[in-house]
Amino acid sequence: MTVLRALSIRGKLLAILFVGVLMPMSIGLAWFTLQEVRALRRELVTTNSLLAYVAGQYSAAELAFDNKEESEETLRALTKLDQVVFAALYDSQGQLFSSYRKPSLAPGDTIPGQIAPPLEPNVEDAADHIDIYQPVVYNDVRYGTIQLRVSTGSLQDRIKAYRWSVILAALGLMAFVVGFAFALELTLTRPLLSLAELARRITKREDYSVRATASRGDEIGTLSEAFNAMLSEIEKRQHEAREAARIQHLLASVSGALAESLDYPLTLSRVVRLLVQSFADFCVVDLVDEEQRIHRVAAAHADPEKEGALRELYECFKPTWDSPLPAAQVLRSGEPLLLPEVTDAVAQAHVLGAEHLRLIQRLGTRSVIAVPLVSHGKIFGALTLACAHPTRRYGPEDVNMAQELARRCAIALENARLYREAQEGIRIREEFLSVAAHELRTPLTALHLTTQRLRRLAPPVPGGGGEANRFAALIHAVEQQGKRLANLVGSLLDVARIDAGKLVLEPEEVDLVEVVRKVVDQFSDELLKAGCTVRLAAEHPLIGWWDSSRLEQVVTNLLSNALKYGAGKPIDVTVEAFNGAARLIVHDHGIGITEEDKERIFARFERAVSVRHYGGLGLGLYITRQIVSAHGGTIRVSSQPAAGATFTVELPRGPREQAPSL
């Protein structure tokens, strides 16, 4: 089977015809010839055996009376037959009694003088003759044996004739089979090879619009029809794939244009330019403002020569809420509008007059889609698309595409509106924070001056009695709360400055160790009150180019954080040089920070614990990170819940070319 599969169609046909036709017919002819030869031999033997039997009946008397002359006459009569070569008569002892042979007998054909008398008639075959032995019996008395030698020459001639007939028949049949195979091959393979060549040409050119000739009504015709159906399906899918790729490319381009800027008039102008390249011949966008007025913000035409007519249409015939324009209709209904065929009657139903109709006809409008720009139930405007191609008409699939484009435009418009509102809210908030902070500083300054005056004017109490101590404690409490409030106001001011980019650094040569010692001394009362001690590891001065006051603010915020969340436990502060930079490490043994809160605590107004248990605005670490980043440094935290927290600040020590700002 493997060899048969590897053969060509011609070879398969020849093999099938040879096995199925030629071989059975050849075997049949050979069998027929063999049967004919056997029948001829049987006929030859039967005929001559009968002759021998008849001659034997006549020869019985001749043997009985020893009459050789009569017996020779009888034998001579037998040899007159063409096939009889000689005839011999033997007595009962097997001795030759008489014989007769044809004169033309070959010298090698001798008549035996003695034979073994057979009991029954016997036939012996030789290459060129048959010997027939017939007992001579009369009235159950055996008198002798008669022998006839019959030539098989005629039988051999018949065999040769049959052989040549079989050979000629086989050759003729073979020629017919080969010719039939070639004709059948041409009938089968020529259309198949034509299909194969067509397939190769289609593959090379990627042109699936060609078709195979399918005029036959047989299986080849069915194959051609199936091949054409396959080509039609491939062409359809290829068209759909190209169309899908075009749509995806268009959507991606529109999305990219919408994402480039929040200036929606500019982005919408770019969008309509993209749409007229592949989806429409001209395109118009109308938006609704906050006062529900319709404004035409963008328009484009694929043909530069018709830009003037579109501009005239753009400027002279703007939609209003009660106008019949497609854009006004979809703004009123909130549903898309499809005009697949813009005839004169259809155009007259959607224009504002004869001049408007003239411009529509001048633009060659043949099909129109108008869809609302809707996002979260709010209508921002309308997108109008028009086709001027003589054979193209918009359909439901184009409406779906237009709605998707409108949806993306609406989302971009909503994002721009939300961004503007957010920016306005941030501006108002920052303005409020700045004003509030400045307004709070005035009473705080007055409060601070008042507490200092009270401390100076307090009458001395001899011996420092309890009343004097209580009065001093009250003044101290007022000073501490005023200081705390001043820090909160300062934090708000810093946030406002950071957002406005007005937090300017004034770097100078500063000893970080000295700054840390100064802040720790300032926290002596708070440390004592919280039951904390500071273990400072800083043996040598560490000089760098930093803003001293802002650096103090960093240390203050980190130390305040450690006091707040690690009260009653020691605080470890390390100042060291590391890889050419300065490193400040503040480690407390407090409540710790969870993994998910480690980054969040550096955002403004964020904290890792409830404000109910720990006060503050949640701005200290945010301001700290901004100050450290402004110095070109980094801050990070490592912590586990209930295992304390370690804040690490790394600052470059070299001078900066200009004072940075946030």
Image: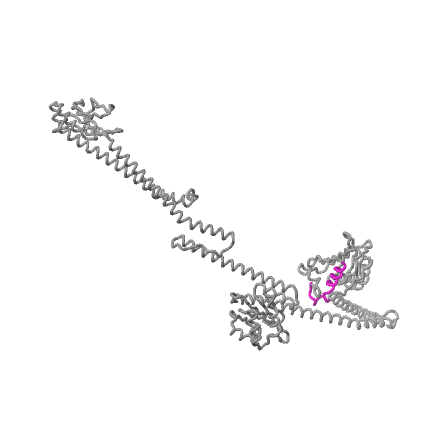
Question: Residue 373: x and y, percent?
Answer: 59, 70
User: In the figure, 403 relative to 293: above or below?
Assistant: above
Question: Residue 479: x and y, percent?
Answer: 81, 69
**Image-quadrant location for residue 480:** bottom right
* Residue 235 is a magenta residue: no
Q: Which residue lies furthest to the bottom in this view?
A: 322
User: In the figure, 7 relative to 397: above or below?
Assistant: above
* Residue 619 is a magenta residue: yes
Which quadrant, please, contains the C terminus? bottom right
Can residue 342 be spotted in the picture?
Answer: yes
In this rendered view, identify the residue nearer to me: 617 or 370. 370
For the record, the magenta segment spans 608-631
In this rendered view, identify the residue nearer to me: 395 or 554. 395
In this rendered view, identify the residue nearer to me: 426 or 436. 426
Question: Residue 468: x and y, percent?
Answer: 84, 71
Residue drawn 59% across the image and 76% down it: 320
User: In the figure, 118 relative to 223: above or below?
Assistant: above
Residue drawn 71% across the image and 62% down it: 602
In this rendered view, identify the residue nearer to me: 490 or 570. 490
Say whether residue 552 is left or right of residue 184. Answer: right
Question: Residue 461: x and y, percent?
Answer: 87, 71
**Image-quadrant location for residue 377:** bottom right
